[in-house]
Amino acid sequence: MARRDGETPRQQRVILGVTGGIAAYKSAELCRVLIQRGFGVQAVMTSAAQEFIQPLTFAALTGRKVITGLFSSRSSEETLSSAVEHISVAQENDLLVVAPATADILAKFAHGLADDFLTTMYLAFTGPVVLAPAMNTNMWLHRATQTNLDTLRARGHKIVEPEEGFLACGMTGPGRLAEPDWVADAVSAAINRRSDLEGERALITAGPTQEPLDPVRFISNRSSGKMGYALAEAAAERGAEVILVSGSVHLPAPRGVTLVSVRTANEMRDQVFKHLESVTIVIKAAAVADFHLVTVPQQKMKKTSARLSLELDPTPDILAELGRNKKDWLLIGFAAETENLEREARRKLETKNCDMIVANLVGRDDTGFESDQNEVTLALRTGEFVRLPRASKRELADEILDQALQLRRALTAPVHER
């Protein structure tokens, strides 16, 4: 609903669905984080969730009644009112987040089953949905669960991938509920969705390239592709037409993005220049291998006790070539460094003719390659450095795009306005 001038903005309201898993205790922390960020929270608990954590916990945190079932048993009047409560809750709130989301609730949502308050309300809810799964590793990897996740992604729901680690069942692997701050980041991004990139055509590269040594071996690097995929997802959600040229990664394609899969640096270079027509933003987030074997043998090299020397040539410098052929697009490159971050970012900005370099220090376990979080420094063509503190890569993606739009305005503004 449009807000009149001078009217106080309405508090954004979130439904927090809590389902039955050992990770339900983390939902209380998520509830606290959401409230700290200014959201009103309405907790909805399944009967199984109440075996792990009491409704009183969420009532104390939110200051609101916790919904625990479709029907009240206290009076006929309350029972009649609660019969349609799932409709009113669906209409009064802006976003639904379910954490933990068990395999059971994912299956029910995917197939439209409605046998309790949460599943019935879900069918009546028309706003954005964020799901944070948590379960045993084998359950997470089961084909049925993955098929249900594909269905929910295609429906436009945001899946906050579980972390890998030691699980309550004793196994080690993917399935641990994502940290509450990361789930809250996804909620903030979904509920504050913008359309400021409508009309833009973004070409984004992501992931590592693989340069073959023989038919079974290759040279590559530790890039997971998570930053590039987060940028592609953020740009698409903000209205851009996005072409994602990706090396080999283990990530689902973001919804609404055209994915072009490549393997080698030469293949990536060819696909980048093939799709340059009408682009307005080029973001080179891929970690392209710097060297490739001069001549790749047709057969597998046999292991011997002798020392082996390889003759390597440089791979094409895609970013430099884009800079030399730059038109009116915004060109953004990435720099992974181990020292002298600002100096190296500025050097790369100038030598590659970029508008922005996103630089980060690598070699740490908690940020950078393979991590879900990062902290970066932006070197801008205007001469400024902007430091973005540690955050989820999805959150950083929006901040990088924000800076890109500000940079474009600064570069295109009349001289007297700069």
Image: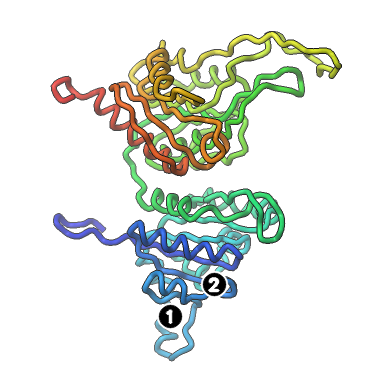
Which residue is at 49% across, 37% downward?
257
Residue 93 % position (x, y)? 37, 64
**How many angstroms separate mark 1 from mark 2 (CA)?**
23 Å
Which residue is at 43% across, 90% downward?
76
Q: Earlier in the sequence, mark 1 or mark 2?
A: 2
Badge 1 element: helix
- Answer left or right for 103 relative to 129: right
- Amino acid type at mark 2: Ile
Question: Does residue 319 sit above or below 254 in this rendering?
Answer: above
Residue 123 at least partly seen: no
Q: Return the residue at label 1.
A: 82
Q: Which mark is residue 53?
A: 2
Question: Does residue 93 sit above or below 271 in this rendering?
Answer: below
Nearer to the camera, 290 or 266: 290
Where is the N terminus found, in terms of image quarters? bottom left
Tell me where residue 145 sits by quadrant: bottom right
